[in-house]
């Protein structure tokens, strides 16, 4: 039998970097409930699993993350998805336009980064 004395980890870590918004989960749900008043929503998955939410993401080529321990929703586009012929300003404007069309003008849009782990 071999005994390992070095560092051993069974944890998993996730991280992301995107241009978009970070919205408190309660604020997010309040905004999307106004758009789809007849559909009960208790968490962000309810919206993004809905026809309206999945269409919004697909039509705008956006991504979302909702780290379970942070009670926040991140919506935007990964920086690695910028097109070769697209400027940074064009990339940002495209995302800002999409987000404002759904969530209004009063948004703090910028580069979002987060990391979390389970152990």
Image: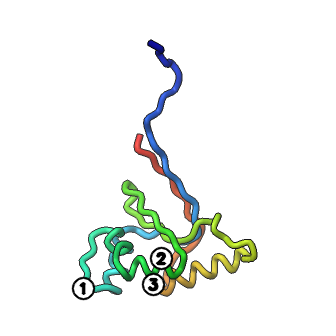
- Answer above or below: position of 35 versus 24: below
Mark 2 / mark 1, whichever is N-terminal: 1
Q: Residues within 10 Å of mark 1 (few under 14, many from 20)?
A: few
State the mark number for residue 102: 3
Mark 2 / mark 3, whichever is N-terminal: 2
Res. 27 in view: no
Quadrant occupied by the N terminus? top left
Between the residue at mark 2 and the residue at mark 3, the CA separation in whole angstroms equals 11 Å
| In the image: residue 106, left or right of residue 40 | right
- Residue 20 in the image, given as x and y percentages of width and height: 55, 71
Q: Which residue is mark 1?
A: 38
Q: Secondary structure at mark 2?
A: helix
| In the image: residue 48, left or right of residue 100 | left
Q: Nearer the viewer, residue 40 or 112?
A: 40
Quarter occupied by residue 19: bottom right
Which residue of the protein is positioned furthest toward the front in this rendering? 1
Which label sits in the foreground, 2 or 1? 2
Between the residue at mark 2 and the residue at mark 1, the CA separation in whole angstroms equals 20 Å
Q: Which residue is mark 2?
A: 57
Pointer 2 with pointer 1, Cβ within 8 A: no
Res. 106 in view: yes
| In the image: residue 18, left or right of residue 34 | right
Q: Residue at x 56, y 84 (%)?
A: 97
Quadrant occupied by the C terminus? top left
State the mark number for residue 5: none
Q: Residues within 10 Å of mark 3 (few under 14, many from 20)?
A: few
- Answer above or below: position of 64 versus 90: above
Q: Residue at x 49, y 77 (%)?
A: 58
Q: Nearer the viewer, residue 15 or 58?
A: 58
Q: Secondary structure at mark 3?
A: helix
Mark 3 / mark 1, whichever is N-terminal: 1
């Amino acid at each position: 039998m071999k005994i390992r004395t070095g560092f051993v980890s069974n944890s998993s870590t996730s991280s992301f970097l995107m241009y978009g918004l970070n919205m408190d989960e309660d604020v997010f749900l309040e905004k999307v409930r106004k758009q789809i008043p007849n559909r009960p929503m208790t968490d962000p998955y309810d919206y993004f699993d809905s026809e309206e939410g999945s269409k919004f993401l697909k039509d705008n080529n956006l991504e979302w993350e909702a780290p379970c321990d942070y009670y926040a929703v991140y919506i935007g586009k990964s920086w690695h998805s910028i097109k070769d012929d697209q400027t940074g300003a064009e990339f940002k404007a495209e995302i800002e336009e999409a987000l404002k069309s759904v969530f209004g003008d009063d948004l703090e849009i910028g580069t979002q980064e987060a990391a979390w782990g389970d152990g």
